[in-house]
Amino acid sequence: MKLVRIFLDILFPPRKMEHVVRSLSIEEVTELLAPVQVQPLVTSLLPYRTESVSALVQEAKFKNNAKAQQLLGTCLAKYLQDAGLTHTTVIPIPLSQTRHKERGYNQVEQVLKAGNIPYTPHVLVRTRDTKPQTSLGAKERRTNLQDAFEVQAALLPNHTYIVVDDVTTTGATIFSAMEVLKSAGALEVRAITLAH
């Protein structure tokens, strides 16, 4: 198996980010786990500016890299366990239909699956395509997400809902999703992002 990998690497050299992810162990990644409250009720687990974290996020998001998703999923599962948040409803931030079709997967769902974290899909749906948030300023990000999410299921008012996304910068996506859940009757809504 190792010889096959070496041969394939010679024919198709790995991307820089892929190479970084391959070199990481779960111990190295969990050492980087440093949950911080980046906004009220929003916790972020890993520092994105660290080369290994940015490689993990980019590989999980854009390349559907199973090892990156597994390492991120393991970190998230560890955090949920350590924080006593195992009896909650985990909701991944949904992609628009267009983006999901282009990519073929939702990276947050892939991370949740890889970490064996039970989650509830389709509670929250994206009602329309939006511009990629990375191309917008803070004010434009909020406007871009107005009426972009909708709740598709009955919510239990006294239950804790946790929205999960990959990266937070301004928090516009997370806050928009949290507001929609609160408007639909959820009393306790929190958010976790893999990196900030």
Image (spheres, rainbow, N blue to C red):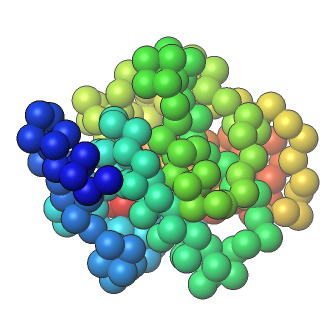
Image quadrant for the C terminus? bottom left
- Left or right: 150 in relation to 173: right
- Depth check, front residue: 145 or 66: 66
- Give the image location of residue 126, x and y in percent: 61, 26
- Identified at 67% across, 30% down, the residue is 125
Count how many numbered circles sit on residues in the image.
0
Q: Is residue 22 above or below residue 146?
A: below
- Identified at 61% across, 73% down, the residue is 80
- Give the image location of residue 118, x and y in percent: 72, 57
- Left or right: 26 in relation to 105: left
Q: Is residue 116 above or below residue 3?
A: below
- Depth check, front residue: 7 or 110: 7
In this view of the protein, can residue 8 be seen by the observer? yes
In this view of the protein, can residue 193 be seen by the observer? no
Q: Is residue 160 above or below residue 79?
A: above
- Identified at 16% across, 50% down, the residue is 6
- Depth check, front residue: 50 or 14: 14
Image quadrant assignment for residue 144: top left
- Identified at 61% across, 51% down, the residue is 113
- Give the image location of residue 68, x and y in percent: 37, 54
